[in-house]
Image: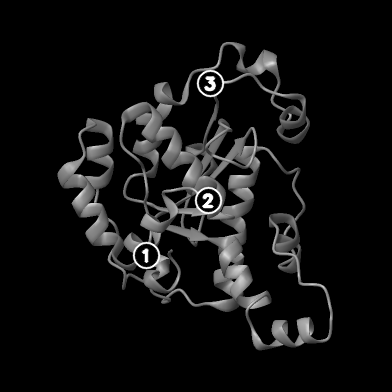
Amino acid sequence: MHGIRPRQKVVQADWVGYMNERAQRAQDSALQRFFSMPLPHPDTPIAQVPMVALDMETTGLDERRHAIVSIGVVPFTLDRIPLAQRRYWVLKPPRPLDEASIAYHHITHTEIAHAPDLDAVLDELLKVLAGRLVVVHFRNIERPFLDAAVKARRGEGLLFPMIDTMSLEARMHRQSLWARFRRWLGRPPVSIRLNASRERYGLPAYQGHHALVDALATAELLQAQMSYHYTPETPLKALWC
């Protein structure tokens, strides 16, 4: 387990306090501005929370050895997804691409040849994320990769609360009494991958492994999850992690 993860378990209990504390001690000006932007109160109904879906493509699954090659963000609310506000960056990783990662995310040597380093777009990315609740599908990729990449470039990490649509699916389809009964019967677990999760709500299939498309898919999935299983009055604290 990477060294940042025990720290994450500590701060998740009080994200507002954590963000305030980071704003006080941040040395980098862009990080200081990001942490200073107030979060919605934990009791805020989800319908009133501004959100942004985030997805990243990486060269592998280990943030200590692999790197981010693209980032897609889509600001949204429960009511609408203003696609004109979407942003997408292809990034040049610090190490050469290998054939396995190219086959997965389809970003080629040519595309990254003149692409910027993450550091060049980080201030812009932080402006999009600031003051919004970040929504991802499987936070164990986005959270450690972004934290490690920012720490390598700015000397300070970047942790913040997220709503994880995969975690919400797990609550309903992996951790319920019915899911436990299925396991007892020897049935395979229900898939909680992004496309499989979308299919349960009648959402269309999108081509996966493109950061912007997957960010849009994640935003739509959260809207569906809230419509089917929650209410607009569900407090933020019941969803973030």
Binning the other alpha carbons within 10 Å of mark 3 as few (below 14), some (14 to 19) or many (20 upward) gives few
Local SS, label 1: helix
When asked about the image quadrant of residue 96, the answer is top right
User: What percent of the width, then of the height, locates residue 183?
Assistant: 77, 81
Does residue 161 appear in the picture of this structure? Answer: no
The colour scheme of the drawn protein is: one colour
Does residue 128 appear in the picture of this structure? Answer: yes
The residue where tag 3 is placed is: 94
Residue drawn 53% across the image and 21% down it = 94
Q: Is residue 69 above or below residue 49?
A: above
Query: Tag 3: residue type?
Result: Pro
Residue drawn 54% across the image and 24% down it = 91
Cα–Cα gap, marks 3 and 2: 33 Å
Query: Of 210 and 2, which appears nearest the observer?
Result: 2
User: What percent of the width, then of the height, locates residue 172?
Assistant: 63, 77
The residue where tag 2 is placed is: 81
Query: Tag 2: residue type?
Result: Ile
Cα–Cα gap, marks 1 and 3: 39 Å
Residue drawn 56% across the image and 23% down it = 93
Cα–Cα gap, marks 1 and 2: 14 Å
Front disc: 3 or 2: 3
| Circle on res. 37 | none
| Circle on res. 48 | 1
Name the quadrant of the C terminus. bottom left
| Label 3 close to label 2 by CB (< 8 Å) | no
- Closer to the N terminus: mark 3 or mark 2? 2
Front disc: 1 or 3: 3
Residue drawn 68% across the image and 75% down it = 173
Local SS, label 2: loop
